[in-house]
Amino acid sequence: MPNAKVLSEKQAIVANLTEKLQKAAAGVIVDYKGINVAEDTALRSECRESGVDYAVVKNTLLRFAFNNVGLNELDELLNGTTSLALSDDPVAPARVLSGFAKKLDGKFEIKGGFMEGKVVPMETIQRLASIPALPVLQAQVLGTMLAPISGLACVLKQIAEKNGAVDAPAAEEAAPAAE
């Protein structure tokens, strides 16, 4: 039986994990066995840049936290080495961790995930991972909105050049006649 101090520390960790899970829009759990320090450092850096909270967690503590928020279906995935990525952005954890899973082929494997308090299948995580980052999506939408305007400006420029080219010879022909 653990002493009271250790037990209270573990309860605090579970309470903190539970709070993070409740606030997160999405999360992904990963088996990180085999990655080295440099790869882990790169992963953590990319997670920070993308607004993803990434941490290695003990399976037992994460199991208690999952049970506290109704994600009991993920319990069966909590074995071996486990890390958790959470974010307010529903796409970011899947995108970042899927990218690393592809780079580190076999060393880093996505176990499962959830979105808005519900467990999602692996296909959903893979689809989420294929969605570009929000700034990229915003740029694409803006580009789509500006395309018709840019096209119109290009056509108007071509018309103006064509009319300018037609008017220029007429002006040259009129000039010698005036002399």
Image (cartoon, rainbow, N blue to C red):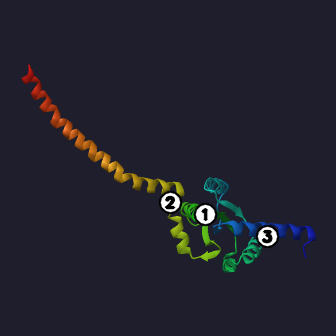
Q: Residue at x 83, y 67 (%)?
A: 12
Q: Is residue 14 left or right of residue 171?
A: right
Q: Taking the image as drawn, is residue 9 in sight?
A: yes
Residue found at the very far top of the displayed protein:
179
Q: CA distance from mark 3 to mark 2?
A: 33 Å
Q: Position of residue 84 (x, y in %)?
A: 68, 66
Q: Position of residue 99 (x, y in %)?
A: 55, 61
The reply to whether discs 2 and 1 touch (Cβ–Cβ < 8 Å) is no
Q: Taking the image as drawn, is residue 57 in sight?
A: no
Q: Secondary structure at mark 1?
A: helix
The amino acid marked with disc number 3 is Val
The amino acid marked with disc number 2 is Pro
Dot 1 corresponds to which residue?
93
Q: Is residue 137 left or right of residue 46?
A: left
Dot 2 corresponds to which residue?
132
Instruction: Determine the image quadrant of residue 13.
Output: bottom right
Q: Secondary structure at mark 2?
A: loop
Q: Secondary structure at mark 3?
A: helix
Q: CA distance from mark 3 to mark 1?
A: 21 Å
Q: Residue at x 62, y 53 (%)?
A: 49
Residue found at the very far right of the displayed protein:
4
Q: Position of residue 60 (x, y in %)?
A: 77, 74
The amino acid marked with disc number 1 is Pro
> 3 or 116: nearer the eye?
116
Tag shown at residue 169: none
Q: Is residue 127 left or right of residue 59?
A: left
Dot 3 corresponds to which residue?
14
